[in-house]
Image (cartoon, rainbow, N blue to C red):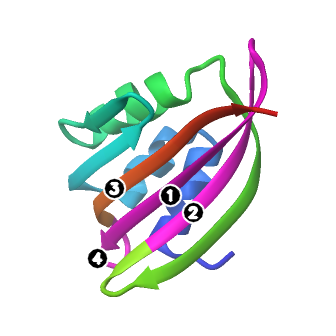
Amino acid sequence: MSDTAGERFVTALAAKDADGLRAVLDPALDFRALTPGRFWECDGVDDLVDRVVLGHWFEPTDHITGLLRVDTEDVGARHRVGYRLAVTNDDGDHMVEQQAYYESDGDRITWLRILCVYYQPV
């Protein structure tokens, strides 16, 4: 895997690394996401990392056991990173796949849109 901002985001997400997520997300991040049944917006990076990503999408009882797939490509001036995670929790084993479209300043993601299929039983 190369070292794009999107791939660093996925690596930090798969490790549930809050500091790694904060390091790759610009403090003035423009963020929106869609999961089944809910549209997400945040009030800053800490809100995104603590409340949404590690507080709701991947709770402390959700164990990300593998990064199954990562693929990237450019879409005009924007970038896409798709990823699939293996997750285990009290309900069993699941796959979670997300597609993220983003812009970056090279080091940090400044604009991010995520679409998620959510937890799919394995």
How packed mark 1 is, by other alpha carbons closer than 10 Å (few <14, some 14-19, many 20 or more), is some
Marks 1 and 4: CB-CB under 8 Å?
Answer: no
Please name the residue shown 52% across and 81% down the image: 73
Check contact, mark 3 vs mark 4: CB within 8 A: no
Task: Name the amino acid type tagged 1.
Answer: Gln
Q: CA distance from mark 3 to mark 4?
A: 16 Å
Is the residue 28 above or below the residue 4 in the image?
A: above
Q: Residues within 10 Å of mark 4 (few under 14, many from 20)?
A: few
The answer to whether the residues at label 2 and label 1 have Cβ atoms under 8 Å apart is yes
List the residue tagged with mark 1.
99
Magenta segment's dominant SS is: strand
Amino acid on which disc 2 is placed = Gly
Amino acid at pointer 4: Asp
User: Which residue lies under the disc numbered 4?
Assistant: 105
Q: Are marks 2 and 4 in contact (CB under 8 Å)?
A: no
Badge 3 vs badge 2, beta-carbon distance below 8 Å? no
Between the residue at mark 2 and the residue at mark 4, the CA separation in whole angstroms equals 20 Å
Residue designated by label 3: 113
Residue 17 on the magenta span:
no
Give the class, few, some or many, for how many residues have Cα within 10 Å of label 2's Cα (few <14, many ≥20).
many
Q: Amino acid at mark 3?
A: Arg
Question: Looking at the image, is mark 1 or mark 4 nearer the viewer?
Answer: 1
Q: Position of residue 42 (x, y in %)?
A: 23, 37
Q: Earlier in the sequence, mark 3 or mark 4?
A: 4
